[in-house]
Image: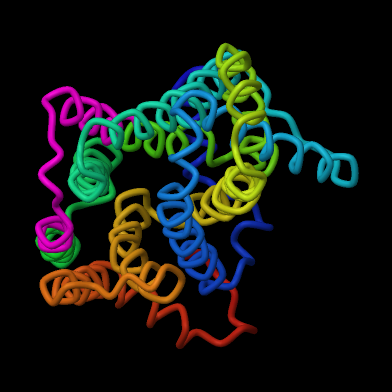
């Protein structure tokens, strides 16, 4: 299967896709952002007992087990064509192994807030690339919203900066941002025409298999770690990975990659609120203002599309 064939298939959704209510992909996207935000709160604790590679393996293995059990009750629809399988393998390795390990490693050699700020340039990369190459366009509202949110993320970072910074951490954070953007673009352009559940399951399985190289370290760390921290990593596999990535794949079938990825700009603001509620970490005034800017920027970028989806009645299905 050549690239044009894949592109044609993605551009021509089947009748089942066209009958999906417009609001459902946005609900899936917002749930995804909430679940991904929760992972930052959990990683703060689990990172004390687990190093980057073993944590990635336990997280991926937990997600793989959950989805494999699900597949016992749901008939998978595997992709056809060697090109799609090759893209799926590269995507699984990059998204569910390399990205997770690189991000974990980055946050060990750079302030977590700074790392998250650098990684969050990914939505801008996606929006520009998708607009110029995939023909999604570059609406001024989308770009303004992204830049406003990035300003807010910068304020949150400044408020939480601890002074822990290395060049290696900076490079790793940039690599994580590029991996994030590349994986979203690969999924949208080559894999969104496939069954999203099967694709996510296969990608997680591939990522977990590649991460088996960290198995010896994981055995030692699980033996030494408190059970509550081990369960926190299992949570990362079940909710922010198995559930959230399935919701993300579903949303990506119906929404433009640049527009959808900009919803991840909500994550830093959600993290601030979650850390306040769950961990009792009262946000500094600068972080609170930054969170408001994140919300405002995201609202400018994706708000009109969500409002149009909500105004459309449930019995008026159509493409998003």
Q: Which residues are magenta?
A: 153-179
How did the renderer colour the structure?
rainbow
Q: Quadrant of residue 212?
A: top right
Q: Residue 108, percent across and down?
A: 30, 33
Up-down relation of residue 141 to residue 42 (above or below):
below
> Dividing the image into 4 quarters, which one contains the N terminus?
top right
* View extreme (right): residue: 73
Choose between 138 and 119: the one closer to the eye. Answer: 119
Give the main secondary structure, helix, strand or loop, of the magenta stretch: helix
Residue for point 48% across, 53% down: 42
Residue for point 17% across, 66% down: 145
Magenta stretch containing residue 174, yes or no?
yes
Choose between 34 and 262: the one closer to the eye. Answer: 34
Q: Residue 114, percent across and down?
A: 18, 46
Q: Quadrant of residue 177?
A: top left
**188 relative position to 294: left or right:** right
**280 relative position to 192: left or right:** left
Magenta stretch containing residue 9, yes or no?
no
Residue for point 40% across, 49% down: 44
**308 relative position to 316: left or right:** left
Q: Does residue 196 appear in this view? A: no
Up-down relation of residue 316 to residue 129 (above or below):
below
Q: Residue 304, percent across and down?
A: 30, 77
**26 relative position to 292: left or right:** right
Residue for point 20% across, 43% down: 111
Up-down relation of residue 262 to residue 74 (above or below):
below
């Amino acid at each position: 299967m050549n690239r044009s064939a894949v592109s044609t298939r993605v551009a021509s959704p089947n009748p089942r896709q066209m009958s999906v209510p417009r609001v459902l992909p946005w609900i899936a996207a917002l749930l995804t952002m909430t679940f991904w935000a929760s992972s930052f709160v959990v990683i703060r604790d689990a990172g004390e007992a687990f190093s980057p590679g073993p944590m990635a393996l336990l997280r991926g293995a937990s997600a793989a087990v959950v989805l494999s059990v699900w597949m016992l009750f749901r008939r998978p629809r595997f992709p056809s064509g060697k090109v799609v399988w090759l893209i799926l393998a590269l995507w699984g390795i990059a998204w569910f192994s390399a990205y997770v390990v690189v991000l974990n490693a980055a946050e060990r050699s750079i302030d977590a807030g700074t790392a998250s700020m650098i990684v969050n340039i990914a939505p801008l990369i996606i929006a520009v690339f998708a607009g110029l190459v995939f023909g999604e366009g570059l609406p001024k509202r989308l770009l303004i919203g992204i830049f406003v949110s990035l300003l807010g993320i910068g304020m949150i970072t400044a408020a939480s900066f601890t002074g822990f910074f290395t060049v290696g951490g900076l490079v790793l954070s940039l690599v994580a941002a590029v991996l994030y953007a590349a994986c979203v673009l690969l999924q949208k352009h080559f894999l969104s025409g496939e069954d999203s559940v099967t694709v996510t399951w296969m990608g997680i399985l591939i990522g977990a298999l590649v991460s088996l190289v960290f198995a010896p370290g994981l055995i030692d760390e699980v033996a030494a770690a408190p059970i509550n921290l081990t369960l926190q990593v299992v949570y990362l596999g079940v909710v922010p990975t198995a559930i959230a990535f399935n919701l993300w794949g579903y949303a990506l079938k119906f929404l433009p990659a640049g527009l959808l990825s900009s919803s991840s700009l909500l994550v830093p603001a959600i993290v601030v609120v979650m850390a306040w509620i769950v961990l009792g970490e009262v946000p500094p005034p600068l972080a609170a203002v930054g969170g408001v800017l994140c919300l405002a920027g995201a609202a400018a970028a994706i708000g009109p599309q969500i409002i149009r989806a909500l105004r459309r009645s449930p019995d008026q299905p159509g493409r998003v």
